[in-house]
Amino acid sequence: MHFLRAAAVVASLASIPAGLAPAQDTPPQSMNDLRQEIDRLRQELSRRDADLDAAKAQIAALRAEIAAMKTVAASTPTASPAPAAPAPVPVPADPTIGPGGLLSTLQAEYLAAFPSLPDTTDQQKLNLHLRSLEPWCAKANRDGIKQYAWTGSIDPASVRMSQRNVSFVAIFRNGTREFKAPISVDQGMLTRVRTKDGGLVGGDLQFNVIVKPRLTVNGGRPAPGAFENPPMVGPYIDFLYELELKSVVPATAEPSK
């Protein structure tokens, strides 16, 4: 009888569907896998600690370098700024002292005649201004022909002799500017500035010259260039001149009449 009951229980259990059978727990991760993960994490932590130590050392070195630079800067005396160069002394408006004095005179006369700048934005007005400069320059060229005794020197490298003629460049200095003028004359005119060996004396000489201004209107030159060659009387006017040499003597000699 008991045997029959046991058999019935077994039969009833066997008839339960598989999906309703109690699920078993997933097997835990193996100890070997856990050890490998722990070792990996330890190595990663060790590498990061080493990187941190290296960064701290680099920061300390930079701080030490900055401190040293500040010490050197504090002990180095500050250089005083160079004094500004004094403005050049203006050349007097006196044509008797040389080309620079003649230029200053003409510049003063130009400013008196044309006190305001031309309107360069209006081409018609600019053309009218340029045309008005022509008669002014013609008058200055005509009235400016005069004789002067200018002190200057001869550029020895420029001397050229050909039979009875000699050509050279005369140099005149007024203020900070140097003016050069080519001259060609008969050798007999240089008798008083000859050396015993036939050369020309150096140093200052007195040039007795007839000066002929040759002011020219230059519509393409409203302002001086980098080297201002030739010099400018004013906007659109070039300062040119010719010299007719009458005599040349040592600068200590009395001017010839």
Image (tube, rainbow, N blue to C red):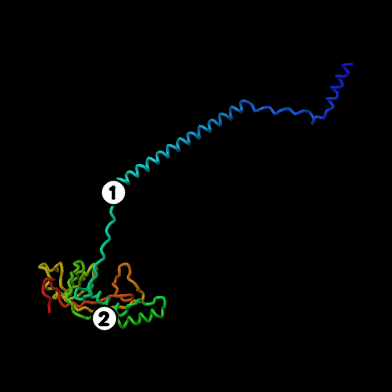
Q: Quadrant of residue 214?
A: bottom left
Q: Image point 70% across, 29% down: which residue?
A: 26
Task: Report whether residue 181 is seen.
Answer: no
Residue at x-position 41% and y-position 38%: 60
1 and 2 marks in contact (CB < 8 Å): no
Q: Secondary structure at mark 2?
A: helix
Judging depth in this view, the residue of 12 and 208 nearest the camera is 12
Amino acid beneath label 2: Asn
In this view, 129 is above or below 6: below
- Residue denoted by label 1: 77
Q: Circle 2 sits on which residue?
A: 141
Give the quadrant of the C terminus. Answer: bottom left
Q: Tell me if 10 is positioned left or right of 163 in this view.
A: right
Q: At 41% from the left edge and 80% from the top edge, which residue is drawn? A: 124
- Three-letter code, disc 1: Pro
Q: Residues within 10 Å of mark 2 (few under 14, many from 20)?
A: some
Q: Position of residue 174 (x, y in %)?
A: 22, 70
Instruction: Point out the tag, 1 or 2, that comes first from the N-terminus.
Output: 1
Q: Nearer the viewer, mark 1 or mark 2?
A: 1
Query: Percent position (x, y) of residue 164?
Result: 16, 75
Quadrant of residue 235 within the rendered picture = bottom left
